[in-house]
Image (cartoon, rainbow, N blue to C red):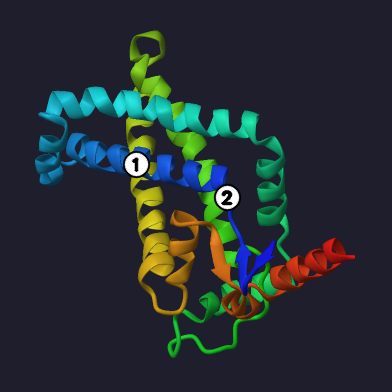
């Protein structure tokens, strides 16, 4: 939907889901760092003490699994569209990844090809979050109910859980930098965390394929 040279990119429900997920993720990140690494033990004060961090990590972990489930059930059409978009990798997406979307210039030279609603980097991160979150959920449940499973499985779960948490944490930090700080794409953060609208001119340049898609739908609705 276009509105005074602005385009609605993210629905209200999606933005709320993003905000809730952000709060849960930060709570899990800081409590997880305090639990797994002595060098970050000072983060425990955010949760009272180390025991509090460990206890709340469990509850936020459950929320990390439940909230997306609720969103999927209540907004299945939006979720289905999202999956369809991030699953649609074409030749332009592969080219985008080869040059890192132009973010590594001048180390990696090349003009970024046209992108859809989500660029190839965002699509890749989407799948990383889905897959790694499932791994975190499974290993987290194994650790939570450690008395019910073989000890060797618990030990491996601790290792995999910590490595997965670190991996997804780094991915989210890169995502935050590119979406909120990098001058080339900082408007993305204001869109997702704000009213959901993006400047038409920005979309035309950064999300050309999606822009044409929206423009076509807008013209059709006017007939």
The residue beneath circle 2 is 127
In the drawing, does residue 131 fall left or right of residue 43? right
User: In which quadrant of the rendered image does the C terminus lie?
Assistant: bottom right
The quadrant holding residue 184 is bottom left
The quadrant holding residue 203 is bottom right
CA separation, marks 2 and 1?
20 Å
User: In which quadrant of the rendered image does the N terminus lie?
Assistant: bottom right
Observer-nearest residue: 149 or 129? 129
Return the x and y of residue 191 as percentages of the image width and height.
Answer: 49, 62
Element under disc 2: helix
The quadrant holding residue 113 is bottom right
In the rendered view, would you say 212 is above or below 158? below
Element under disc 1: helix
In the drawing, does residue 127 fall left or right of residue 16? right
Image point (13%, 36%), residue name: 44
Total numbered labels:
2
Q: Which mark is residue 222?
A: none
Observer-nearest residue: 59 or 93? 59
- Marked residue nearer the N-terminal end (2 or 1): 1
In the rendered view, would you say 67 is above or below 203? above
Image point (47%, 73%), residue name: 185
Regarding residue 38, the answer to whether it shows in the image is no
Observer-nearest residue: 25 or 166? 25
Image point (71%, 62%), residue name: 89
Q: Residues within 10 Å of mark 1 (few under 14, many from 20)?
A: few
In the rendered view, would you say 20 is above or below 121? above
Regarding residue 167, the answer to whether it shows in the image is yes
Return the x and y of residue 208 as percentages of the image width and height.
Answer: 68, 76
In the drawing, does residue 93 fall left or right of residue 37? right
The residue beneath circle 1 is 23
Image point (52%, 50%), residue name: 128
**Disc 2 versus disc 1: nearer the observer:** 1
């Amino acid at each position: 939907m276009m509105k005074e040279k602005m385009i609605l990119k993210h629905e209200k429900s999606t933005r709320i889901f993003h905000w809730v997920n952000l709060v849960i993720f930060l709570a899990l990140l800081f409590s997880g760092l305090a639990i797994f690494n002595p060098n970050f033990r000072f983060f425990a004060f955010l949760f009272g003490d180390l025991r509090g961090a460990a206890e709340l990590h469990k509850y936020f972990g459950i929320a990390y699994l439940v909230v997306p489930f609720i969103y999927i059930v209540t907004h299945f059409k939006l979720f289905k569209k999202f999956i369809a978009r991030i699953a649609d990798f074409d030749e332009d997406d592969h080219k985008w990844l080869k040059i890192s979307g132009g973010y590594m210039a001048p180390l990696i030279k090349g003009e970024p090809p046209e992108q859809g609603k989500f660029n190839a980097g965002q699509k890749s991160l989407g799948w990383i979050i889905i897959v790694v979150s499932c791994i975190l959920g499974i290993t987290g449940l194994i650790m939570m109910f450690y008395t019910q499973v073989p000890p060797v499985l618990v030990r491996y779960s601790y290792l995999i859980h910590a490595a997965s948490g670190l991996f997804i944490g780094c991915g989210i930090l890169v995502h935050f930098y590119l979406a909120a700080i990098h001058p080339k794409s900082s408007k993305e953060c204001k869109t997702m965390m704000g009213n959901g609208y993006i400047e038409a001119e920005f979309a035309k340049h950064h999300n050309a394929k999606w822009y044409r898609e929206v423009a076509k739908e807008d013209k059709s609705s006017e007939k």
